[in-house]
Image (tube, coloured by chain):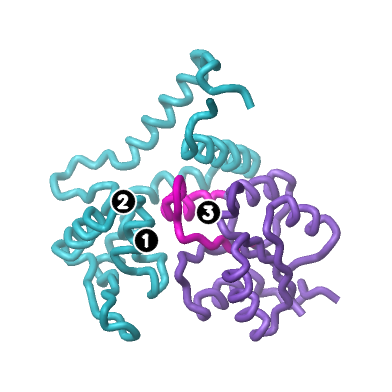
Chain colours: A purple, B cyan
Amino acid sequence: MKSILIIEDDATVAEAVSFVLERNGYETTHVETGSRASELLKKQHFCGALIDVWLGSEDGLDVLARLRADGNTLPVVIMSGGGPGHTLESVSTRADVLDACAVLFKPFTDEELLDAVNRSCPDDSCAAD
Amino acid sequence: MSEERDITPDRKARGIALLLEQTARLVYDEKQPKALHAVQWSALRYLERAGANSRNVAGLAKYLGVTSGPASRTTASLVSRGLAEVTDSPTDSRTKIINLTEAGHAVLEHDPLNRCARIVHELDEDELSTLALALNKLHSRLSKPPVE
């Protein structure tokens, strides 16, 4: 089963995203911070990650930048509804520069979520044992 | 992190900052009277990329970081040029969806960013990776208040 790491500080959004992905054959793990995600990525295999830009005091794109600077090439889908200091234009630009596979503008539909995740993780061979 | 106001940038740092500013201006250096403005190009890119649920004035406003007034005016300017059209949402009659027209899709093939993107594409992998991380760092710092 393909495993997806969800980095999202809003439990309600994480739950809704997990529900859609799990109903469609994915296994999900939810963490609330970038540091917890980094720890987990060192010891566990994931096929991809969904990262929210607004992580409380943290910037989800800075989390992605740290992963890329460490050489991590995990397929990533960015989620954002905009917010202070984060126009969706700058979010999508930085996400492109950091090799994110897709950007989901909130509110997005279940179909848009699945399409982005399916396109980001098309390879069945990445599924964990 | 050192306090930004205590840093005295050297000539090279100022030169790089100026080069960034001049490079950005070069992208939209089109002199034709009917040329689209940068914000109209941004809106066209958004409409091409956004899903149906966010392809409306509120979504465009969040994308551009403006209030709904300027976003409405930008939408109207694209509609008057025949590049976009506004229709009722099939799922919610209170909501209007903004769609690109065929002409809107066609004009995006001449997006002034394309030339810059093609030149960037020709950089070697190390240059590209260094540039990406450096620009991301710069953008991230500039979009936050200065460190006091």
Residue range in magenta is A76-97
Q: Quadrant of the N terminus of chain A?
A: bottom right
Q: Position of residue A68 (x, y in %)?
A: 68, 48
Q: CA distance from mark 3 to mark 2?
A: 22 Å
| Disc 1 and disc 2 in contact, CB within 8 angstroms | no
Q: Quadrant of residue A15?
A: bottom right
Q: Chain of mark 3?
A: A
Amino acid carrying label 3: it is Asp
Please check whether the numbered discs 3 and 2 fall on a single chain: no
Instruction: Find out whether residue B9 is within the magenta segment.
Output: no
Residue at left offset 37%, top offset 57%: B62
Q: Between residues B9 and A34, which one lies in front from this camera angle?
A: A34
Number of other residues with Cα within 10 Å of mark 3, as a class: few under 14, some 14 to 19, many 20 or more: some
Q: Quadrant of the C terminus of chain A?
A: bottom right
Q: Chain of mark 1?
A: B
Identify the mark at residue B46; answer none if there is no mark.
1
Q: Position of residue A103 (x, y in %)?
A: 51, 62
Q: Secondary structure at mark 3?
A: helix
Q: Between residues B14 and A25, which one lies in front from this camera angle?
A: A25
Q: Nearer the viewer, mark 3 or mark 2?
A: 2
Q: Position of residue A35 (x, y in %)?
A: 73, 50
Q: Between residues B117 and B89, which one lies in front from this camera angle?
A: B89
Q: CA distance from mark 1 to mark 3?
A: 14 Å
Identify the mark at residue B66; answer none if there is no mark.
2
Residue at left offset 26%, top offset 53%: B40
User: Which of marks 2 and 1 precedes in the sequence?
Assistant: 1
Q: Chain of mark 2?
A: B
Amino acid carrying label 2: it is Val
Amino acid carrying label 1: it is Tyr
